[in-house]
Image: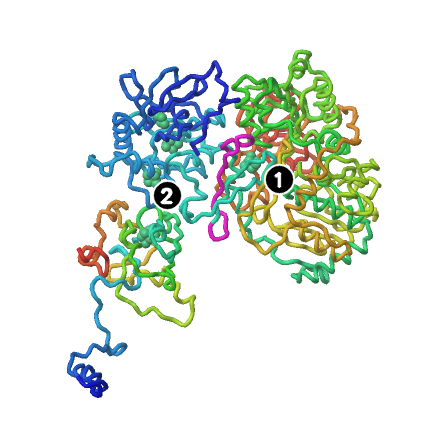
Amino acid sequence: MPSFLDPIAGFGVTFTTMFRKVTTEEYPEERKPMMPRFHGRHVLNRYSDGLERCIGCELCAWACPADAIYVEGAANTDEERFSPGERYGRVYQINYLRCIFCGMCLEACPTRALTMSHEYELADNNRADLIFEKQDLLAPMSSGMVAPPHAMASGTTEQNYYAGEFDRPEDSAAPTGTAEESR
Amino acid sequence: MTVTTASTSGDTLEPRPDLVTLTIDGVETSVPKGTLIIRAAEQLGVAVPRFCDHPLLDPVAACRMCLIEVEGMPKPQPACAVTCSDGMVVKTQMTSAVAGEAQRSVMEFLLINHPLDCPICDKGGECPLQNQAMTSGQGDTRFDGPKRTFPKPINLSAQVLLDRERCVSCARCTRFAEQIAGDPFIELLERGSQQQVGIADDVPFNSYYSGNTIQICPVGALTSAMYRFRSRPFDLASTPTACEHCASGCSLRTDSRRNAVMRRLAAVDPEVNEEWNCDKGRFAFRYLESDRRLTSPLVREGGELRPASWDEALVAAANGLKTADGKTGTVTGGRLMVEDAYAFSVFTRRVLGTNDIDFRPKGSSPEEEQFLAARVAGRGLGPTYADLEGAPAVLLVAFEPEDESPIVLLRLRKAAKAGTRVLAVAPAASRGLAKLDGTWIPSVPGSEATALQNLAPDVVDLFGQAGAVVLVGERAAASPGLLTAVGELCDRTGAALGWVPRRAGDRGALDAGLLPTLLPGGRPVADAAARVDTAAIWGAAEVPETAGRDLPTMLKAVEDREISALLMAGVQLDDLPDGAEAALRAAEFVVVLDTHDHAVVQFADVVFPVAAAPEKAGSFVNWEGRVRPSSQPLRTSLMTDARVLSVLGAEMGVAGLESDPVALMAQLEEFSGWEGARVSPPSVAGAPPDPGPGLLLATWRPLLEATHLQSGEPYLAATARAQEVWLSTGEARELGASEGDMITVTGASGSVTAPLVLAEVAAGAVVVTGNAHRALGASGVRVQVAVEGQG
Ligand code: SF4
Ligand code: SF4
Ligand code: SF4
Ligand code: SF4
Ligand code: FES
């Protein structure tokens, strides 16, 4: 090709692209669904009666390669029970300035308390607001749930909870965004 | 901590007749006769897995985890219980499939009933069972039946919780309680899968040493209410510290998380606390987080204390002290580290220009001052814990080790088991003495000196033996002539003399010269050479040569207007003699350096907040005279006492006072090894107690009591011993009282009612345990005793 045509050849790319399918997304007017295994903001799940699944074991914090999670455990008492069993997470924080969304924490969690949602809109104009506290992370109350503290269902022990008797249907179905889903 | 090599005394290079030679994993080694195989293997770097083995407890071979193969023996043997013998051929899991298989099987059995608690278990992350399940176990279980369960957890005491599901029945806790602490409250009960640690329903595990069982439990079966769920091992930054609670001087490990202390553990220090400590040192640190902490300087304005800037407070303090112009007294308390105590010594002499300084709480006497200056101050190390262990006989005078220096009790128990005779000149045969299998030499409070002078000749002979030790407690000061008699006994027999104060800072304060007649390192103020020497080290022109006043004289001088200002550090109102409040009120100017806002602060004109022990680096000196260095676990913006004194000194015109702990310690070191004149020992005649109606009170402060350093820790407080009144059977009969009756003891200023315990008590005396000194006064006062409601 003669060299004087070179500038025009460049427009050829532009020209063909005009007839391709548009990939631009109209975000934020239009939000596309994420891939099922997408790792978004964490959720601290509840049992079907509203008790928290988290036992404050800190295994997620231990597993986290970015040191983004901070947990302090405390003892449940008969008067004030937040989770089945002896221990619950009194303080739970995830620092989204550190989190790299690797999902190691989910794999470490022994009670499936921690999962990841598809929420990715994690931006702010200050650091403090990007440290999510327990109340920011806890799953919302859905029907049939009672906000803790409250006792375990009568006649049950934590073993009934751990055995899955108080899982919400969506826990045993496909939990959003856990690694499990891909199997 | 379990991996400690056995003591191989002496030089191991020389072949000695008591060595045996054996082969472990094909390596030939020689060890002293009697060495356990597990220890010999450790020396070769082979770690045999274990749970029940502990180098300071007698072997039991309870857990079977350490099975190894010994050639010629039909079955695998427990390495922790079989001693090495000549020609033995041992194969551990490293070289023997039989041993490896045996260990794997034992682990499988252990895990059959073990709960899946790791995520909620305090031991998770530092658990020998977790670790050894990985190294010596198999990945999966073949057992799929239901596990044995127990209700969990149960309280052994308010502090110690037991989860029986997690217990591996290693008997470490029960052996510790029985063999080391002498508090056999817990025992292994039942058999097979039901085997469990048990305790009587009505007798909680209120041992002063109970926290050690939590530390040595190889699983998370024993946990403390205080530390429960508070953190994970990877959260914790560990700092080696020295305990600030008593003169035993334990090495501790302080674990902190986000600048707050989470827990403290006994550190391994074979020369002092071995691997143990007491519950006070382990659990009492929440005082740091008290809302009474002082955080900014305070100055008095219009009768009220108000927060002030450092500059303002320094100027106010400097002006006030300058106005007093040397008519100033310094009083320090037991919390001071030796560096800070030394800074007070320098500040008082160089800046205030006086020798009016005293570190001793109430109950002190001129006799005590002379005794300490002559026989203890600046004498360096000794007698030591090792000396106690090797002593043929130990005499305890006005000293209740279990309450007043708990590690001394543990070491004496070890010694007593090995044949040391322990004798105590005391008003009663206490339970602590019974733990030592000790001999009681009865004496009512006030007549101990006479008892010492009239010791039976065979007892005196005991102390004529090489290595004998006499330990005298700080309460001896309250009994006239006693310290004289103690000194004379040691002179006469050649026994080593140890003074065991109660508080962690006392020995350091003494060595730093916080006495009116004493300069650092045991130098007498009265000695010109000592003053010249001291001035040279300080780079000062001179050191004041008039002897100062002790605490009671100082307080009197304040009321008589001879002293107008007081400098006080770490002093509680309770430490001061009765009636001290009047003197504090009369003082024109009071400067207080303290960590917390308590009663004495209310008398201050200027208050400086200072760092508490875990917030600074420094050291204590324990009763042996051993320096106990302590690193700084917590960050703080607060200054040390020494630093405050340094800036205050500069404000008052003496610049360059040292405040760096390392430099202060180095300077204090220069004072050691004084060979010049000493204060001469006291010579005070004993004064037998006044005759009168009623009984002579005997009391001492318990280990656990409601003091400021133990505040904020309810679980610990709940394990304190209940107050009791001890009477001899004869005395009780006369009163018509029997064991358990409530007895009211009435003194001049108050009364105490507590249940009666029949005990061996000297005729004419009554023992009131617990905090009796607050209500009734010190030992030696006359009290009236009656059954509650009568009399
Ligand atoms: S979220 Fe899961 S892993 Fe994290 S503390 Fe709670 S229970 Fe433990
Ligand atoms: S004792 Fe050890 S193995 Fe057992 S539950 Fe606790 S951490 Fe896990
Ligand atoms: S409670 Fe702990 S120390 Fe005691 S026997 Fe059980 S496992 Fe051993
Ligand atoms: S014995 Fe004394 S030094 Fe040791 S831990 Fe207890 S209080 Fe601290
Ligand atoms: S360690 Fe040897 S039997 Fe327990």
Residue B401, disc: none
The chain holding disc 2 is B
Mark 2 residue's CB less than 8 Å from ligand 2: yes
Please state the extent of the stretch shown in magenta in the rendering: B257-276
- Give the Cα separation between the discs numbered 1 and 2: 33 Å
Q: Is residue B270 magenta?
A: yes
- Where disc 2 sits, the SS reads loop
Q: Residue at x 49, y 23 (%)?
A: B8
Instruction: Report ligand 5 position as a quadrant.
Output: top left
Q: Is residue A82 visible?
A: no
Magenta region, mostly helix, strand or loop?
loop
Q: Residues within 10 Å of mark 1 (few under 14, many from 20)?
A: many
Color style of the picture: rainbow
Which x, y percent locates residue B235? 42, 49
User: Looking at the image, which residue sits at the far front?
Assistant: A2
| Quarter of the figure that contains the N terminus of chain B | top left
Q: Are marks 1 and 2 in contact (CB under 8 Å)?
A: no
Looking at the picture, do discs 1 and 2 lie on one chain? yes
| Quarter of the figure that contains the C terminus of chain B | top right
Which x, y percent locates residue A40? 28, 64
Which x, y percent locates residue B485? 73, 23
Q: Residues within 10 Å of mark 2 (few under 14, many from 20)?
A: some
The relative height of residue A160 versus residue A49 in the rendered view (above or below) is above
User: Which label's residue is closer to the chain start, 1 or 2?
Assistant: 2
Image quadrant of residue A140? bottom left
Q: Identify residue for label 1.
A: B620
Q: Identify residue for label 2.
A: B125
Residue B375 vs residue B444, the one in the foreground: B375
Image quadrant of residue B40? top left
The relative height of residue B243 versus residue B398 in the rendered view (above or below) is below
- Where disc 1 sits, the SS reads strand
Q: Amino acid at mark 1?
A: Phe
